[in-house]
Amino acid sequence: MHRWVTLAIAIAALTAVGCSLGCSSKKGGAPSTAGEATPIGTPRPGFEGPIPKGALTVKDGEVGRYGGRLVLSIAGNPSTFNPMLANDVPTNRVLHGKVYESCLRFKNDTHEMVPSLCEGFERGADGLSYTFTLREGLTWSDGKPLTSEDFAFTYKVLLDPKVVTSTTDLFRQGVDAAGKARFPTLEVLDGRRFKFTLHTPDVLFHVNVASMHPIPKHAWGKAYAEGRFNEVMRLSEPPENMPVSGPYRIHSIAAGERVVLVRNPRYWKVDSAGNRLPYLDKIIFSVVRDFNAQFVRFKDNEIDAIEVRPEHYDALKREEPRGDFKLHDLGPALSTYYLMFNLDRRTKKDGTPYVDPIKLGWFDSVEFRKAVSHAIDRVGIVRTVMAGRGTPIHSYYSPGNKKWFNPDTVTYPYDLDKARALLTQGGFVVKDGTLHDSGGHPVEFSVTTNSENATRIAMLNVIKDDLAKLGMTVHLRPVPFNEVTSAMRNGRNFDAILLGWGSAVPPDPAQSKNVLLSSGASHAWDPLQDSPHRPWEKAIDDALYANIASSDFPTRKRHMDRILAIWADKLPQIMLVVPNQFVAGRSFLGNFKPSALRPMLSWNVDQLFLSRPRAR
């Protein structure tokens, strides 16, 4: 085993066999009791208990001031307060990094993995073991110790097939001789140390561990033992029953209106002057389902920072000189838009198929999907829907992901003649202006998207008109976002869906197992396969496992290029466009460092502060 060293590892330069992360500790002079005044103001609610002996000192950024609130927006209600079950943007936006912390954390501004709940880790020389050490003196927000047992409990829950969480796929390491999924084992060494033993080397396994947000065993161990884990940490749970590890804890929720977080009085970070973090007293997430409404509320000073849609850029740019905000151009986004057909071959409990067999025959045809892709005018979508501020894409990654993007995959320029030729090749014919399959069935299907997103609805209108030129009848089905995710995860009751991918953090292939692997819960066109249903899905599985097993970047890149080439050729999801990324934030937000990686506005929420009082 290698000795511990103190460093932050840049993901792009990760090639060493043994590594660890570390940080300095500092007790500082900030308040340790509720309501105590300090040179930088009075925190309300105040801090409780002593600063942990192993407190992390955050060395960058300005020293801020205590007090005030930050108002952000989310497009819908969180679906749960359980970080293990979080699998949608509103829930992740509220919980991850704000309410629940992880062992290590990705620093969006420098693209480094840095210490968090863990002061560091050590990787064995053979790449088959990882030992993590927690900070000394950590507690949950209720004052109970946060220990290795909490990580062991969380990992046990994560591997339970009765608890559906996309994080599980990140830990999957192929199958054993009997075809059963293999996962690393976790051993508790003592109160502060725990060790993972792997089946195959994974040079980025520590990044997978960073995706696991531990939950307190003392709070939820009994419910899990009784088989009630999926019922706990619901939105109706009293906030005082939910101990947390992040800078903020749940205070209240008003469904359809807001979620309010307040300071965790026992948070374990301090700034460079020794002041306890976080600075802000309160974070408010306003539920604003429509992006146009978010834009209006930002202009009306009701929201402090927003992700700016391309169609809103010009209006904000005109107002910036006289407005109390700054517009930030972050370049090409790493998030993407896609159209996906339901290729699910499974049947429901009553024996009926999830997908109408006639429609499944269309959707599962590569010629059909390629024809649809050629019929979509991506350049027109960028021009009319995104005000020219976007880029057509044809494979999984955005060109904004400069490290992994592959520009040499097959593309699908707008070409109706080619689309018609592909349909003919697939046995489709046009009769009286309507496309029919070889059995004489007219091609008619619906596309679901979330009703809160005007951009996606506008894209669908373009796509509907484009596909009508081939004789297809497309019905638009806008529904609330939670219904979209429920249709994908539970009922599987959809023909096609238009949604978007936000980038994993860090934006590395190892973080896309839940999407790319055929066994993944987010392999949404045909999820949770016991073994790959299609040869090309097996090829992707094999290439991804080869990618994450190597520490040599050229080798990893070669395997990922193979995945991107298969994706572009087989089109499990028809990639559409990537927007340019803009954000806007109030001028009084201190330490505001927006990033193209999510969460763009609040990745350093524990350091944000109000540099001056609000005007209103």
Image (spheres, rainbow, N blue to C red):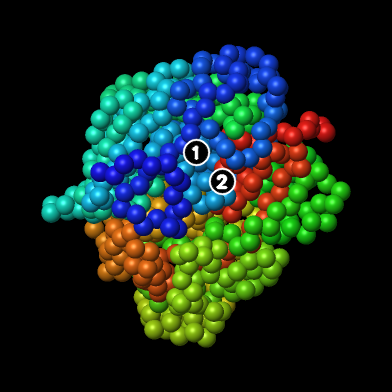
Relative horizontal placement of residue 474, taking residue 426 as reference (left or right): right
Residue found 56% across the figure and 73% down from its top: 376
Instruction: Give the camera-side residue of 594 and 386.
Output: 594
Q: Which residue is at a point 54% across and 79% down the rendered structure image? A: 413
Kind of residue indicated by mark 1: His
Dot 2, crowdedness within 10 Å: few (<14), some or many (≥20)?
Answer: many
Q: Is residue 483 above or below residue 422?
A: above
Does the rendering let one see residue 186? Answer: yes
Residue drawn 31% across the image and 53% down it: 17
Quarter of the figure with the N terminus: top left
Give the amino acid type for the residue marked by disc 2 in the picture.
Answer: Pro
Task: Check contact, mark 1 vs mark 2: CB within 8 A.
Answer: yes
Would residue 480 appear left or right of 316 to someone viewing this image? left
Q: Which residue is mark 1?
A: 96
Instruction: Tell me residue 614's x, y (percent).
Output: 79, 32
Q: Nearer the viewer, residue 126 or 315?
A: 126
Q: Is residue 259 above or below residue 14?
A: above
Marks counted in the figure total 2
Query: How far across and down, in percent of the image, does residue 384 sit?
Result: 69, 68
Name the residue that disc number 2 marks: 599
In space, the residues marked 1 and 2 are separated at their CA atoms by 9 Å
Residue most toward the left? 177
Q: Of 384 and 554, which appears nearest the observer?
A: 554
Return the x and y of residue 516 as percentages of the image width and height: 37, 59
Residue 99, above or below 360: above
N-terminal label among 1 and 2: 1
